[in-house]
Image (cartoon, helix red, strand yellow):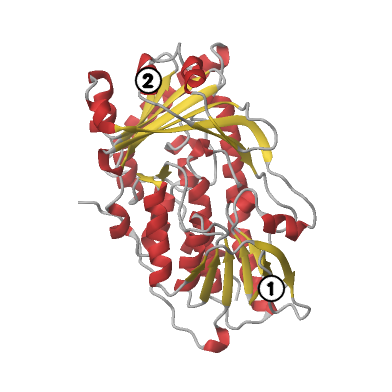
Amino acid sequence: MDDFKYTVQEKISRDPSNTLDVIIVGAGLGGLGAAISVLLAGHNVTVLESASEIGEVGAGIQILPNAARVLFSWGLKDALEKFATKPKKCNFIGWRGNKLSEMDYHAYTQASSSPFWDFHRANLHKCLVDRTLELGGKIMTKARVEALKVAQDQLSATVTLQDGQKLTADLVVGADGINSKLREIFLGHPDPPVLTGDLAYRIILDADEMRKDPELRNFVDEPQVNYWLGPDAHAVNYVLKGGKLFNMVLLVPDDIPEGSNTAEGDVEEMRAYFKDWDPRIGKLLSMCDSVLKWRLCIRPGLEPTWSDPSGAFTLLGDAVHATLPYLASGAGMALEDGSILGLCLARIADKSSASKAQALRVYEACRRERTEKVVKQGTYNQWIYHLHDGDEQQKRDQRLKEFEQWELDWMSQPVFTVPESSETGPDPLPWRCNGVGRWLLTYDTNKDVAARWVS
């Protein structure tokens, strides 16, 4: 039986005099996570979504122990477990198929008292929608925000929708993604995301078809996350929906025409790119009939602040710190953002500008350094994963083996935990203890808020 350690938050009952009306712009994972956390803090929440229907595009998503801890605290463990695939380990593989190193997810789950779970994004998203509505939140579709204005008395902010409707709240949260309109309104000028030079091919395969091939069967029947590292590219795959589907992402140099972020991919072109790689990749790609490609961009940070000094507006998630998916932590950071925001708003004594501004200062203090480190680590991983064969690649592969032995020695101890630290180590398999595991996987949102809050 899983022995996860977490505390489910109870919804706070508030007097109307200190209950905020909060508008969250964007019904993605970050916006809905923030909605749940703010609702649990006892406030009223309306989520505005520009799309005509609530849903989530995309395919697979990895949820690491730090993000799982947040989701469980919102009372979602049982709902999520129905959809979770539980990988046993993570393999790093050379582009020609040679095993480089591995990470024992089961051991880290025990050490951190929180799991590594994989989901189809649509299932995770639906659980967040259901919890938002269960807690009394409202979700409006076809609600595209075109303008934002903070009131002269600084006690509220008003958003104007595309249809001309105006909505006012004590606090507006911009969780509208990497192409955030609210970020640009807040800054007062255009601010496009930063190109990374990479794109992602995303495909979903039928796991039953894979089981027919002895070389591929183990990928499905022994759930694991696999990373192939190669010149200018890498590939990732893992099982979804308990073994029914197989998610694969291939990261290559960006060739999407300017002015677009997605495009229909050419399957033959994709296969040709990986034709000399591990033959198992070729087999997997032969099972694919069509593919989409997505341009990968980042948001390296926002200075000097994410929030209006009035306390009536802030940003959250990809709108402020979008990262490359090479640390599997973009959604995790947005979920942590939402958790911290709710925990800070749970502590306010009244609806004054000063109280809200203090809550947002603590929120940002908790989030800024951590999220900026994740963005930088994602960019570092782009370099370390994509090394060409040569001296640097050989040093990377040697370090992978050395740190794997360190891990085995560490895990042989009678009792082992992931030691908390703010340091980033040199292990190229980043989630291990001597990579970023110490500060990434052990994070506790409750502890961070409690440590930084000044009455």
Q: Residues within 10 Å of mark 1 (few under 14, many from 20)?
A: many
Q: Position of residue 363 (x, y in %)?
A: 60, 63
Instruction: State the residue at coordinates (57%, 79%).
Output: 20
On screen, residue 98 versus residue 301, left or right, reads left
Q: Nearer the viewer, residue 37 or 261?
A: 261
Q: Residue placed at 60% from the left, 83% from the top? A: 350
- Disc nearer the start of the sequence (1/2): 1
Label 1 amino acid?
Thr
Q: Which mark is residue 286?
A: 2
- Residue 1 vs 164, above or below: the answer is above
Res. 5 visible in picture: no
Residue 427 pos. (x, y %): 48, 30
* Residue 386 picture location, percent across and down: 55, 22
Q: Nearer the viewer, residue 65 or 240?
A: 240
Q: Check contact, mark 1 vs mark 2: CB within 8 A.
A: no
Which residue shows up at 50% across the image and 44% down it?
329
Q: Is residue 281 left or right of residue 296?
A: left
Q: Nearer the viewer, residue 409 or 377?
A: 377
Residue 79: image location, x then y, percent: 30, 59
